[in-house]
């Protein structure tokens, strides 16, 4: 009888333990499943304007981004200086009359000839045209030069150490350029107040402004763009930097250039903000960000945490890339980036693209 009771008790204990193990295993598996499900959720993306899409060329040019990245890897291996040049072309295109590829258009005069665009590298412009040729050969004339400018700028950042992020596509190319519009580009002599006002008029926040200014973490600038900074007293400058700049630029008309980032001039990182904290910003518009109470805290946060900078920069670029874009039946897809199509060419391309957009809408 005692044996039966002990045996029964043992079976009860084993059953309870088994139940606990089963329950625990289920909870662990459920927890892991939840983690996997959460990690597979798409990252939150900034809002995009009507007519653009995160997968605009999914059906008619699925290898577009791989083609662009592959070509730029080869270009930067030979000439890494084209990376900041491509990023500058993107900003100077979008801030004039929207991201419509107007800066690429030839003319006499044209946007490239204007004072605000001094130093735009012909090699970088040719790289965009080379990309157009590659992509149109692969997919037909369905990808705009305006979209290629955006993709080239995005890859210029990521391939030199910066953040990897998606950009919405579907822009059309404009038919005209704007000489007067280039005067809206903020000069490097701007103090923070004017800089914030200029960007606020286009719905950019102080964080956006400080993040976009971080594009000066690589590249070079001509003497005429920063000569006033060498001897000015309005914004502090490191004496050693001032001495070196004086040697590089004996006059404002000198053809020499200086690096924008004295620490890591060929890498896209957050050292630009460390420079500002040490009075080593090249432009007045850069250094004053650390002097102004509205932006100093943002500079410090980016200097201490590169991921915070990268995330803010990516969001600001996506926002900038949507300024006054042409989509749908607006604009055209140029057969050559430096020349607007004839009316006949434009109508043919628009028809092809719109049919493809309708097709995607029913998938």
Image (tube, rainbow, N blue to C red):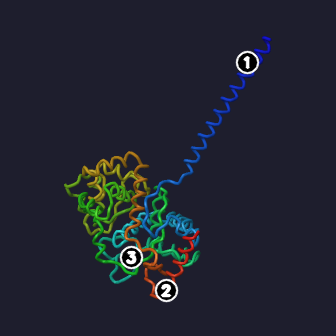
- Mark toward the viewer: 1 or 3: 1
Q: Position of residue 179 (x, y in %)?
A: 31, 77
Q: Residues within 10 Å of mark 1 (few under 14, many from 20)?
A: few
Q: CA distance from mark 1 to mark 2?
A: 89 Å
Q: Earlier in the sequence, mark 1 or mark 2?
A: 1
Q: Residue furthest top?
A: 2
Q: CA distance from mark 2 to mark 3?
A: 18 Å
Q: Position of residue 50 (x, y in %)?
A: 44, 68
Q: Which residue is mark 2?
A: 345
Q: Earlier in the sequence, mark 1 or mark 3?
A: 1
Q: Residue at point 23% right, 54% down?
A: 235
Q: Residue furthest left?
A: 233
Q: Residue 61, located in which quarter of the rendered image?
A: bottom right
Secondary structure at badge 1 equals: helix
Q: Which mark is residue 102?
A: 3
Q: Quadrant of the C terminus?
A: bottom right
Q: Residue at point 41% right, 76% down?
A: 104
Apparent side of residue 61 relative to residue 152 in the rendered image (left or right): right
Q: CA distance from mark 1 to mark 3?
A: 85 Å
Q: Earlier in the sequence, mark 2 or mark 3?
A: 3
Secondary structure at badge 3 equals: helix
Q: Is residue 15 above or below residue 179?
A: above
Q: Which residue is mark 1?
A: 9
Q: Position of residue 134 (x, y in %)?
A: 55, 74
Q: Is residue 52 visible?
A: yes
- Mark toward the viewer: 1 or 2: 1
Q: Residues within 10 Å of mark 3 (few under 14, many from 20)?
A: many
Q: How many marks?
A: 3
Apparent side of residue 357 relative to residue 111 in the rendered image (left or right): right
Asked if the residue under mark 3 is in contact with the one under mark 2, i.e. CB atoms within 8 Å, the reply is no
């Amino acid at each position: 009888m005692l044996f039966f009771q002990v045996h029964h008790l043992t079976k009860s204990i084993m059953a309870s333990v088994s139940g606990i193990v089963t329950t625990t295993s289920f909870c662990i598996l459920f927890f892991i499943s939840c983690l996997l499900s959460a990690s597979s959720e798409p990252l939150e993306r900034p809002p995009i304007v009507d007519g653009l899409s995160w997968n605009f060329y999914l059906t008619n040019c699925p290898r577009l981004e791989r083609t662009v990245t592959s070509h730029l890897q080869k270009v930067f291996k030979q000439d890494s200086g084209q990376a900041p040049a491509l990023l500058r072309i993107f900003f100077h295109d979008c801030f004039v009359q929207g991201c419509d590829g107007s800066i690429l258009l030839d003319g006499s005069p044209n946007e490239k000839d204007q004072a605000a665009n001094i130093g735009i590298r012909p090699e970088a412009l040719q790289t965009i045209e080379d990309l157009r040729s590659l992509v149109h050969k692969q997919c037909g004339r369905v990808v705009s030069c305006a979209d290629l400018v955006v993709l080239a700028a995005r890859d210029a950042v990521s391939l030199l150490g910066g953040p990897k992020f998606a950009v919405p596509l579907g822009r059309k190319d404009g038919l005209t350029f704007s000489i007067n519009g280039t005067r809206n580009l903020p000069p490097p002599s701007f103090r923070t107040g004017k800089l914030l006002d200029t960007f606020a008029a286009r719905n950019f926040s102080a964080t956006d402004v400080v993040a976009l200014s971080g594009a000066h973490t690589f590249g070079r600038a001509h003497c005429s763009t920063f000569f006033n900074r060498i001897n000015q007293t309005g914004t502090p400058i490191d004496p050693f930097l001032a001495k070196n700049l004086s040697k590089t630029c004996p006059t404002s008309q000198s053809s020499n250039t200086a690096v924008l980032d004295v620490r890591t001039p060929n890498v896209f990182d957050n050292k630009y903000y460390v420079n500002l904290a040490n009075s080593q910003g090249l432009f007045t518009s850069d250094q004053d960000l650390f002097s102004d109470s509205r932006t100093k805290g943002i500079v410090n946060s980016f200097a201490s945490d590169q991921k915070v900078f990268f995330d803010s920069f990516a969001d600001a670029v996506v926002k900038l890339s949507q300024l006054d874009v042409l989509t749908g039946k607006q604009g055209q897809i140029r057969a050559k980036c430096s020349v607007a199509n004839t009316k006949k060419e434009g109508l043919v391309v628009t028809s092809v693209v719109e049919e493809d957009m309708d097709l995607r809408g029913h998938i």
